[in-house]
Image (spheres, helix red, strand yellow):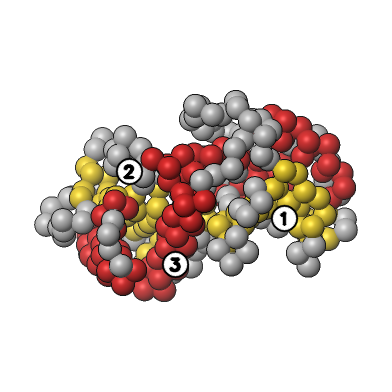
Amino acid sequence: MKDYNKADQQLHLLCQIIGKANRRYVPEKADESHTNLYFDSWGNKILGRWIQTESGNVIVALDLKTFTFEVLSSSRNKILTVSTIGKTIEEIEREFETLLPKAGLDPAGFRAPMPHAIPEYSFSNLPQEAIDPKALDQWKYFRELANRSCNQLLGYAQAESEVRVWPEHFDTGVYFEYDGKIGIGFGLAMEDSMAGAPYFYMAGYPKTGSLVFENLPKSPSWKWELGEHWKGAIMPVTMFELKSDTQIDKILSDYILQTFDWYIRQA
């Protein structure tokens, strides 16, 4: 997963630029969800949110075929583009900033720091390189799987929410309240020290009281993490190695259904 993790990190770093555009130009929300992103597997892009201008709505995107930032009109015409390969993040941001008036956007405040710092990666201050094609394909596969699984969970729960990528932790996830009793968080996270690999997570947050983690559903494919700061069920994507798409869908759906059903029966 080494190349996959580097791809995750490179995209995490690049997408702070989209997060900054959202933060500056999208109406603020208390939970900072106005800064969120979306992986568009059809268009092969990572998208921000729609931004209102005097000339119409625009959206900031990162094209994953060309590694170029774009500002698109509502008719998907390119208003401006900024290439990334061979440039540092600071150089990309400064070039993007100078072009923002072409999209009807005031550049003032665009480059201000995001509310939460992200990790300092080994390449954070170096010129950007193209992501390994195989690693990028794997990244897109798992992020599309996360998009689909999030939507399937929303359908199963008959809940309303957005499937989004959070620029701080760069997880593709969804959060919703179920039956007015418990909040549910589900998604795909980057590798961290807890899991040691990228992983799917499921967690519940009761509206009142606390959960007693007993009689937990178990499987060789996932485990429960019951730490001081976070409790939930995680499944590393390494569980999918050498598995067919059909097998992966079965492993993932079993994980989602069993852990989600456990949570809603505790609330």
**Which numbered disc, 3 or 2, marks the residue that appears first in the sequence?**
3
Give the residue at x 62% y 35%. 128
Q: Nearer the viewer, residue 133 or 82?
A: 133
Measured as percent of width and height from the top left, residue 178 is found at: 37, 64
Alpha carbons under labels 1 and 3: distance apart: 23 Å
Q: In the rendered view, does 23 fall on the left or right side of 115? A: right
> Which residue does the numbered mark 3 point to in the structure image?
148
> Which residue does the numbered mark 2 point to in the structure image?
197
Q: Amino acid at mark 1?
A: Ile
Measured as percent of width and height from the top left, residue 22 is found at: 67, 47
Mark 2 crowd level (few <14, some 14–19, many ≥20, 10 Å Cα):
some
Mark 1 crowd level (few <14, some 14–19, many ≥20, 10 Å Cα):
many
Q: In the rendered view, does 233 fall on the left or right side of 48? A: left
Is 134 drawn above or below residue 86 in the view shown?
below
Asked which secondary structure carries label 2, the reply is: loop
Circle nearer the viewer, 2 or 1: 2
* Quarter that holds the N terminus: top left
Measured as percent of width and height from the top left, residue 40 is found at: 58, 61
Asked whether residue 105 appears in the rendered view, the answer is yes
Asked which secondary structure carries label 1, the reply is: strand
Q: In the rendered view, does 229 fall on the left or right side of 75? A: left
Q: Amino acid at mark 2?
A: Ala
**Which numbered disc, 1 or 3, marks the residue that appears first in the sequence?**
1
Q: Amino acid at mark 3?
A: Arg
Give the residue at x 82% y 43%. 100
Measured as percent of width and height from the top left, residue 249 is found at: 32, 69
> Which residue does the numbered mark 1 point to in the structure image?
59
